[in-house]
Image (cartoon, helix red, strand yellow):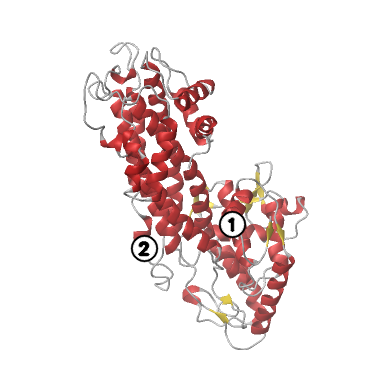
Amino acid sequence: MVVGTSGVTASDVLAVARGGARVELSEEAVAALAAAREIVDALAAKPDPVYGVSTGFGALATRHISQELRAQLQRNIVRSHAAGMGPRVEREVVRALVFLRLKTVCSGHTGVRPEVAQTMADLLNAGITPVVHEYGSLGCSGDLAPLSHCALTLMGEGEAEGPDGVVRPAGELLVAHGIAPVALREKEGLALLNGTDGMLGMLIMALDDLETLYKSADVTAALSLEALLGTDKVLAPELHAIRPHPGQGASAANMLSVLKGSGLTGHHQDDAPRVQDAYSVRCAPQVAGAGRDTMAHARLVAERELASAVDNPVVLPDGRVESNGNFHGAPVAYVLDFLAIAAADLASIAERRTDRLLDKNRSHGLPPFLADDAGVDSGLMIAQYTQAALVSELKRLAVPASADSIPSSAMQEDHVSMGWSAARKLRTAVDNLTRVLAVELYAATRAVELREGLTPAPATRAVIDAVREAGVQGPGPDRFLAPDLAAADAFVRDGRLVAAVETVTGPLR
């Protein structure tokens, strides 16, 4: 992955964070780094105070720092700001954090020396992952504590995880991989800390996960409609064309593709006539579609943030070094919260379909709880309890973090974004949504198989065959359910559900 002064994409971030891609600096980036550094060095030589170069930070910015103390100032900001607490953050998040900070450093707007940027690339290429903690960022002035722990590793201090997964002193890891610790100079400590990189990295990865999950939700909704003998007429393109939300149309088209050739749909007028299917079935494209459109907006914000150079102060092409507020995470925080709301609602409608499959009064002929011998067997009763617990948790995670500013730094930083917190809870929401869809998949495939004498759609048959091969058992007497649910979770999580459908339908939208 060659990093220039601009042009980093979401795919690049995923390749480095999740795929372990190697990183190189372009000649253009090295030249931009050197040019910006000359500007910082010239300002550092002047007697006039410049924020971040020859002053303290935050509420302490009023103190002018003499030249002999400036290296210590930069070391001190990293050490003092590396104040995170709580569990370790996942390796992929930290790799995204370092790579995105490197992206901004290479823009030529930060004043960092080329050798500092090269050391960041060396760290990624060596598979060294700084230990970053869950708590410490308010999402303003950047993800300060998380980025500080990363900068601390560049200095050869603190702890980091090696490519073997073992946590060791960072200095030992750098020596073992032939990397010299960085001795920070004017502005460099501040430049390594002042970005929205953590929340942006988690947004990009959440969008990658949700892309698969929204397709998965279309599949599980289609399977539930089929198992409930619902009608696919509500998925007709002409109905969605008159309410032209792009996500809604895509979701309906996916469901229609999955149901093509089904012998189960259209029986809603048989033994127990119904004019319409329930909202959780009939309105599935509208709910999933709204989430898809929310994702489209979130991608736009992510693309804009990827094109940004977030630092304070910044080095401008005309030689000025100016303070600014571009580190405020509000744009990213909002969409992180929006996505958590959409994930909660998608999980909620999936749970309602599952409950309908299990209720003999609403399932149109299916056995109670899809049990083999109801009363002796409880079937999937408690699987739905688990799903309901996950949905309730998702609703709590949907409460926006970005509406909960809290002042800091002696009221200098008196309004913050809480974007890091929004990102952390979105990661949990994505995990829980996966589990919710896994339970619906488990129930719907069992229900379809219980519709004896009716032929499911070819795509449904492909899903049932694949999920059974993956270790998720079909109908039968009660058994230990947790392993089945775990296997269903993995089947959804790693994309095998979508892949199974696409062997019949072709690529879903």
Q: Is residue 236 left or right of residue 173?
A: left
- Identity of the residue furthest to the right in this view: 178
Q: Residue 433 occupies which quadrant of the picture?
A: top left
Residue identifier under label 1: 9
Residue drawn 35% across the image and 41% down it: 285
Task: Work out whether 101 lies above or below 220.
Answer: below
Disc 1 from disc 2: Cα separation? 30 Å
Q: Residue 360 occupies which quadrant of the picture?
A: top left
The N terminus lies in quadrant:
bottom right
In terms of sequence position, does the residue under pointer 1 or pointer 2 come before the other?
A: 1
Q: Tell me the kind of residue under disc 1.
A: Thr
Task: Work out whether 24 lies above or below 205.
Answer: below
Image coordinates for residue 465, horizontal then vertical, percent: 51, 21
Residue identifier under label 2: 405
Residue drawn 56% across the image and 60% down it: 147
Relative depth, front residue between 316 and 61: 316
